[in-house]
Amino acid sequence: MAKLKSPGELETLRSSIIQKRDPNKPCITICNGTGCQSYGGKALTASFKNEIKKQNLESKVDIRVTGCHGFCERGPLVIIKPAEILYQRVRIKDVPEIVLETAVNNKVIERMLYTDKASNQKITSEKDVPFYKLQKRLIFGNNGLIDPTSIEDYLAVGGYTALAKAIKMTPENVIEEVKKSGLRGRGGAGFPTGSKWESTRNAEGDVKYVICNADEGDPGAFMDRSLAEGNPHSVLEGMVIGAYAIGSHEGFIYIRNEYPLAVRNMTTAIEQAEANGLLGDNILGSGFSFKIKIKRGGGAFVCGESTALMASLEGKVGEPRAKYIHTSEQGLWGKPSNLNNVETWANIPLIISKGADWYSQIGTAGSKGTKIFALTGNITNSGLVEVPMGITLREIIFDIGGGIPKGRKFKAVQTGGPSGGMLPENMLDLSVDFDELTKAGSMMGSGGMIVMDEKTCMVDMARYYTTFLEGESCGKCVPCREGLRQMKYILDGITQGRGKEGDIELLEELCATLLDASLCQLGQSAPNPVLSSIKYFRDEYEAHIKEKKCPSGVCKIG
Amino acid sequence: MAENKLKDEVKQILKKYQNDKSALIDILHDTQSAVGYLPREALEAITKGLDIPLSRVYSVTTFFKAFHLTPRGRNLISVCMGTACHVRGADKVLAQIEQELGIKDGENTTDLKFTLETVNCVGACALGPMVIIGEDYHGEMTPEKVGDVLKNYS
């Protein structure tokens, strides 16, 4: 394909792609995110391809293999367009029937439809399923519409429109737009993205770097993977716009090696964008050049921290450093560097194409836009959900997530990954907002949301998170390395029946030291699970210590 | 792998990354995929090729969870210990695998048939507890299913 030399040529290409497509032609869309692949999605896809060949329907029925749709609980998911019929838990034996009955004859096969548990009704269309209906899928929605390995698919849904618009603006205006949108970093800390860009742009030096953090290390979180796997071009487009605004010509995507499909799809996307003149030298004939390299991570949770990630990019041990000098001034190789997370980058095209005024209408005063959560644990509908900021935890867990399975009661929800806090039932009406969650003793984090039922022991959960964090502490600073070790020792004791009077206070004291004296966010946020569980579930600690009993029956005491 | 072959292999990988020091982690990943683990000879060859001290290569290798200095079994069992799997009983599944194979997390069976390790999240939380053997995903695992699943590997 020839390189596009102007925004006009991009539009011509887009029109020709759309014109070639018949919106009424049946298309079988098969989800092949990692979740659906685990259910056998690959074999299912092959079976669909064979069946279409066998029935000689190649010219009549299209197949599209997409990334994650989010409703992992009911995978493998298959959607038949244009009628948008959703089939769930599809098996290979169902394939011939779907091809013949639904794709060709447009008949609905009842048994594969989703049944709404509340009304006991079969639902035909994806958009009417309560799990999807209450979401606002601005960032994640395109995953179901495009084949992530096809740049044409991305262009057909309006891809790279924002880039074409951005390069006609001045870099300052692009930054102003992002600032005005109110977008805050989706990686955890919630720092205003526009201000970060501005500091990097204003920092002295000709060489500047733009980095995408795709090292999603939180156990129980997989939204970044689903974006990188399912819509890699949206991340690239965001990065190119950011690089243009900041004045950077070289970028890196630091991606988890445990996400092979994401690495593969991202690599393909980079090659396609370069071949089309949307990345590389003289992007869309604007004179602006920007290159992106992929670097694989080595599996260290601490590398989600910006300075540790940059050390790792330099080929060094992923240890963080003190940040009295910001990375926007001295980051990678001592040069001004701007790091944002996958989801943050994926928000950028939307802000630029629809405008900050439109974007900032969504959400709360201090938190704009939507957030994708990985809803997991003891929940009826596990999966990825994208909701507007300001929605309550109760709405996410009960209305979208379908509540707690097996007729059990809700006990707690943990937001923000392993170093988030655990919130009890009376906090369920809390709205999802960076500041509200922090005030309650938890955090937005990167977007893990783990639901726990009444059979979960909160002391055991605190022990679990502390053990994880102790293992992932890089060992550079003493409070984190030694503090977490002692906390783990005390929590092991309590959960094994060796708890003693004063343990809770000692834990609180250690937490205070970690908060005050740790070098990076790993240590500074590590006390959250312990402090929040003491605050909201102190009676459980006391039962373990004084009565040598685990009220939930999880810990083996005695 | 014979030492000469190993050195050639490392040389090819170094060439792919143009002997770039900052690509150390990628180079270690590729070497490990080719050799199966990271023997001392491979680390020495990387040291020479990148002109950095062995201590630095060693510190990076031991810092990151992905790298291994000893040989690995033919079938890698990864038991997900992520939070979603944890609340659904992953520890009981792990205990059962440890008992059946007579090895602990991080160890190989003596016949090198299996290596057992725990991972923090494979992002297939809806199917937890999750056990991955080689490239096969075994979702909704229970201690009772362990024996039958392990039988399928040689």
Image (cartoon, coloured by chain):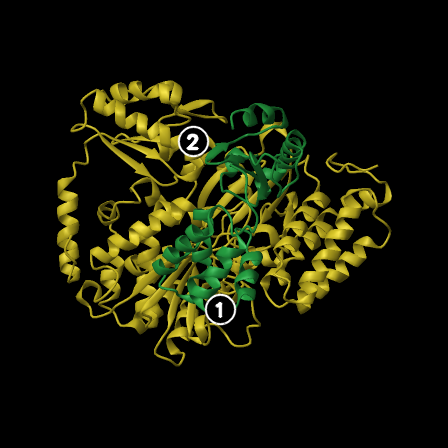
Q: Which chain is green?
A: B
Label 2 marks a residue whose chain is A
Q: Which residue is mark 1?
A: B52
Q: Residue at x 55, y 73 (%)?
A: A323
Front-most of residues A279 and B119: B119
Task: Determine the image quadrant of residue A75.
Answer: top left
Q: Residue at x 47, y 72 (%)?
A: A327
* Residue A61's disc number: none
Considering only vertical position in the picture, is A108 above or below A272?
Answer: above
Residue designated by label 2: A75
**Residue A154 screen position, x and y as percent:** 26, 48
Q: Is the residue A324 above or below the residue A11 in the image? A: below
Q: Residues within 10 Å of mark 1 (few under 14, many from 20)?
A: few
Label 2 sits on a secondary structure element that is loop
- Is there any visible trace of residue A256 in the rendered image? no
Q: Amino acid at mark 2?
A: Gly
Residue A338 horizontal/vertical position (percent): 42, 68
Say yes or no: labels 1 and 2 on the same chain: no
Residue A31's image quarter?
A: top left
Q: Is residue B145 visible?
A: yes
Q: Quadrant of the C terminus of chain A?
A: top right
The one of A16 and A83 positioned closer to us in this rendering: A16
The correct choice, above or below, for A155 with respect to A73 in the image is below
- For this view, does A324 lie left or right of residue B101? left
For chain A, what colour was chosen?
yellow
Residue at image position (34%, 51%) is A266
Tag 1 subunit = B
Residue A509 screen position, x and y as percent: 76, 62
